[in-house]
Image (tube, rainbow, N blue to C red):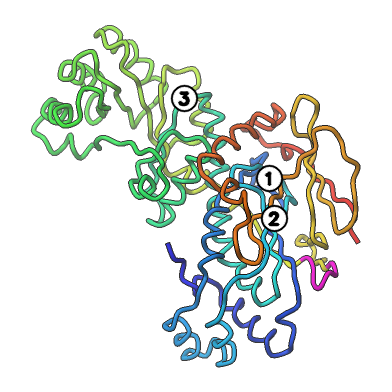
Amino acid sequence: MRVPALATDRYELTMVQAALADGTADRECTFEVFARRLPAGRRFGVVAGQARVLEVLEGLRFDDDELEHLQATGVVDERTCRWLADYRFDGDVDGYADGELHVPGSPLLQVRAPFATGVLLETVVLSILNHDCAVAAAAARMVVAAEGRPIVEMGSRRTHEAAAVDAARATYLAGFASTSNLEAGLRHAVPTAGTAAHAFVLLHDSERDAFAAQVAAQGTGTTLLVDTFDIAEGIRTAVEVAGPGLGAVRIDSGDLAVHARFARGLLDDLGATGTRIVVSGDLDEHGIARLSGAPVDAYGVGTSVVTGSGAPTAGLVYKLVEVDGRPVAKRSSGKATHAGRHHVVRRHRASGIATEEVVVSGAAEVADLPGDTSPLVPLLRDGARVPGADGAVDLATARTRLAERLGQLPWDALSLSEGDPAFPTTYVGEP
């Protein structure tokens, strides 16, 4: 999908105009995306959205209507509009692959381009990555808490309609089993799931009639929502209508642990020993963890994951770190940056557990140690994808990558409690 070129902040274009006027627009620059800190309660971040970033960079254009609006409203002058009319991103990009982990200071995206070309990207790049990374990190924590039980993403009605599609992709990358969002199924091949809501039960003259209609349409393997009125009666009616081969019942309210235990006992008594129990209703990673001992087979999660489980942004920033090969940095209190273009070494124990993120400036070098890897991979050169870039952003590959990376975390980094980042960041070679 085309992202409008004006889906950006005004100051990006006014900086371009000023740089064109004073001759600094063509200075070769490096911009980096990183988080100064992780959102409260998070021990690691998850990279998601790089696929969308590449699509935007490859297709970013200013059309006639957008240019006419900019000039008519006095945002920029005629000279800048002419420059924008010819805009094509032709720089270089390196980044962490989708499904990679990040910690404070990780340069998860590097853009090397003339100043005017690169500064234009700040808002749209951060809009994508702050959303998708936050959703993926929240979803990954839920996947860890679920301990192998599948999770269905069903948050479309709790967010913007476009964001819902991107959230579904990010949750699937993080390990969710499926989504309720059909557009995500079409666009990203994410498996979809869903049967009926309470409205379908209320539509009919009785719960029995509703269940019978659903089973007739979807088969006995469907999931029947049994808590519209009375859970016990709903379960009995569901089994009577569908038989002991009923696929699943869903409980969407109340004390889910208590209801799940009751439902399991009743289903077993009715001979429906293979009928699964799905629970939903304002669940987050902490709610899922509390249900670890309950006889729950699957979870449905909505609001908490599409809003990033209390952290609707990953806290990423896009900062200039190098101009014409000269390292530059902010020294502002609380907002300082680390100067220079960086390369990264991630260190691991012999067991494969990650121990440190070494962020190296400029020409500085660090000794090679067994287990060292580099999360930074080339994505674009002169605006075109490099060989291997598709693998860095492919959804299925990213899903596998994240599962592997979670297995490389220290055990305490998987805890849902407050604590330090999963592994520390060390800076080497700063000017």
| Place of residue 308 in the rendered image (x, y in percent of width and height, measured from the top left) | 52, 46
For the N terminus, give its image quadrant: bottom left
Residue hosting label 2: 34
Q: Are marks 1 and 3 in contact (CB under 8 Å)?
A: no
- Against 168, residue 258 (above or below) is above
Instruction: State the residue lying farthest toward the front.
Output: 387
Query: Which residue is under mark 1?
Result: 102
Q: Is residue 69 magenta?
A: no
CB under 8 Å between discs 1 and 2 = yes
Counting from the top left corner in percent of width and height, residue 101 is at: 66, 42
* 310 to 316, vertically: above or below: above
Q: Amino acid at mark 1?
A: His
- The residue identified by callout 3 is 149
Question: Sequence order check: which comes first, mark 2 or mark 3?
Answer: 2
Residue 325, image quadrant: bottom right
The image shows residue 233 at horizontal and vertical percentages of: 20, 19
First of labels 1, 2 by sequence position:
2
- Residue for point 28% across, 21% down: 247
Q: SS at mark 3?
A: loop
Cα–Cα gap, marks 2 and 3: 32 Å
The secondary structure that most of the magenta stretch takes on is strand
